[in-house]
Amino acid sequence: MAKQNIINRTIGVNFNTSGTAEALVWAPFTDHLVLKLKNSEVAMLKQQHGYFSVTTDQLKPGDQYQFLVNDKTLPDAASLFQPEGVHGPSAAFDLKAFDWTDHGWQNIPLSNYIIYELHTGTFSPDGTFNGIEEKLNYLIKLGITAIEIMPVSQFPGSRNWGYDGVFPFAVQNSYGGAAALQQLVNACHKKGLAVILDVVYNHLGPEGNYFGQFGPYFTDKYHTPWGSALNFDDAGCDEVRRYFIENVLMWFRDFHVDALRMDAVHAIRDFSPVHILREINQHVAELMEQAGRTHYVIAECDLNDTRYINPLQKEGYGFSGQWIDEFHHALRVAAGGERNGYYSDFNGITDLANAYQNGYVYHGQYSNQRQKTFGTTTEGIDGSQFVVFSQNHDQVGNRMLGERSSQLFSFEMQKLMAGAVMISPFLPMLFMGEEWSETNPFQFFVSHSEKELIEAVRKGRKAEFADFHAEGEAPDPQAISTFENSKLSWDLLDKGHHKVMLDYYKNFIQLRKSQSAFKHTDRENMSVVVDEVNNTLVIQRWTNDQQVICLLNFSKQQQQINIPEEVTNWQKLLDSADPKWNGPATSPEIISAGKLSVPPEAILIYTQYHA
């Protein structure tokens, strides 16, 4: 593991204890580097391995600056703030200036995470970090324990999902910048909420990407679906690796973020002796040891390879957990959703049962879509290492029209799908607004300024839906209306069935938190019985002091479900078909062995406690 400064950020512009600015820039593509200030220029001293450095009292926090690289004036590749956007000058920011009040905060156990994924620009009316802060009390009452914020690194314009960021260290100016993010994290900790930040290390966006003019940040050895691959194992890779390791450490150390969700790690190619992902997690482990704080790194990975989530001690990459798209895919098909595109590889209720038992649906079987045997066994891995959901930004926003479940499934099925996530031995995640059956879509939006790029994005979106046989036209990603249409409708919370759904979610989340059989993420204490013909599942979970039985009917007809012989005088915990949840009929309060009639598209939960 390369030696890395754990205590302080060293690259870019930083301020020492005396308030003097120290700049360290990697620019091996030039022999001379100049720091350009408002009224002066400061020559920088060339160091080893392509670095340039300078210490100066001419640059203060808030001052704008740039670098002169081969006669081109460029913003800082390690900028912390871009007040005028991706093409403007950088602004110096003192990471140590914020007055933190969360010194007593300790990250909650990962197994207690109930995650709420949100997009800063569309979550609140004003689309800022302050807008999120104003809604924290709402999230607490809902029962959320951790918010997951989609990427905030500076992107072009003011409208973007965040995956087109081009300044990994700079916090989006239209959201409020770095100080506002620090304030939000501090406020979350004050209220007992953990904060997960989505980060992107598999590519950088196309507009405002000046990295290639400084040094070999990219490699031609590999390609990604989104642009040039970052250089983690080619000539010059040591300093690229340092750059992204420093980025990870900054979010934890200087922004007090509790966890990172790392986007599409399967697209990060590295054949070094120590994979960059493993090295990142090695440094995180060192930071935790030195700082005495707990941090988690969660991967988005579609390779079904437990090497990513195996601990460092077992030669894994050391991720705390990963998103499981396959649970979502199996759940959607079981619920009657389409079976085109990547959904074609899933067989509904049988694969959903498989997902409950194994996390991965494919853990060594043949995949028709991939045309190969796919996946590894998950034996011995705790359920807290898997994050599951019925909706997320990808699965909603990457539909052509961005429809949520509220537009695709009945009210009863929405309740069943929510329940299917909550009763799992995995970490549940909600996508903003699903808890009140939000009707507005979440669509793909950008705000580029380059005409050719705008047209390329439009054409790319149309081509993306070829496998899904979608009819009609995709919304224009560049149009302001596409962004505005994706904002949450907060005025729906106390209206009709939206209020009912919100109360239902609150009730289910409280159930998840209060019942030991649901709270624990032990995958061993669970049995799953599937009825393919009638499209039903019977899931039993237990701890030393409690047993629960969950009856899930995904069919559109009432079904007779066999209750196991050991079930005697079990009490009802939840009934999604109860009229109080706008359901068709209530079920018995007490059940015993035999058959129970379960309403269509419903989930029933019964329990028995042990003294």
Image: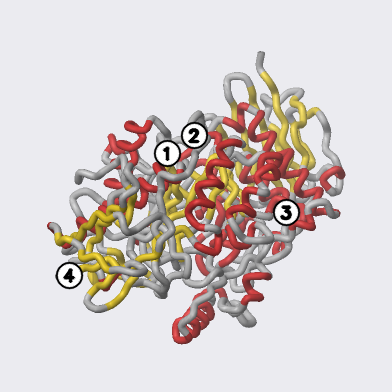
User: From the image, which quarter does the N terminus lie in?
Assistant: top left
Left/right of residue 584 with respect to residue 300 in the rendered view: right
Q: Position of residue 416 (x, y in %)?
A: 70, 48
Residue tagged by mark 4?
32
C-alpha distance separating marks 1 and 3: 36 Å
Identify the secondary structure beneath mark 1. Answer: loop
Under mark 1, the amino acid is: His
Residue tagged by mark 2?
107
Residue tagged by mark 1?
295
In the image, is residue 117 above or below residue 605?
A: below
Are the residues flagged by discs 1 and 2 in contact, CB closer than 8 Å?
yes
C-alpha distance separating marks 3 and 4: 64 Å
Are the residues flagged by discs 3 and 4 in contact, CB closer than 8 Å?
no
Q: Which label was assigned to residue 413? A: 3
Mark 1 or mark 3, which has the lower sequence index? 1
Q: Position of residue 508 (x, y in %)?
A: 70, 39
Left/right of residue 604 with respect to residue 442 in the rendered view: right
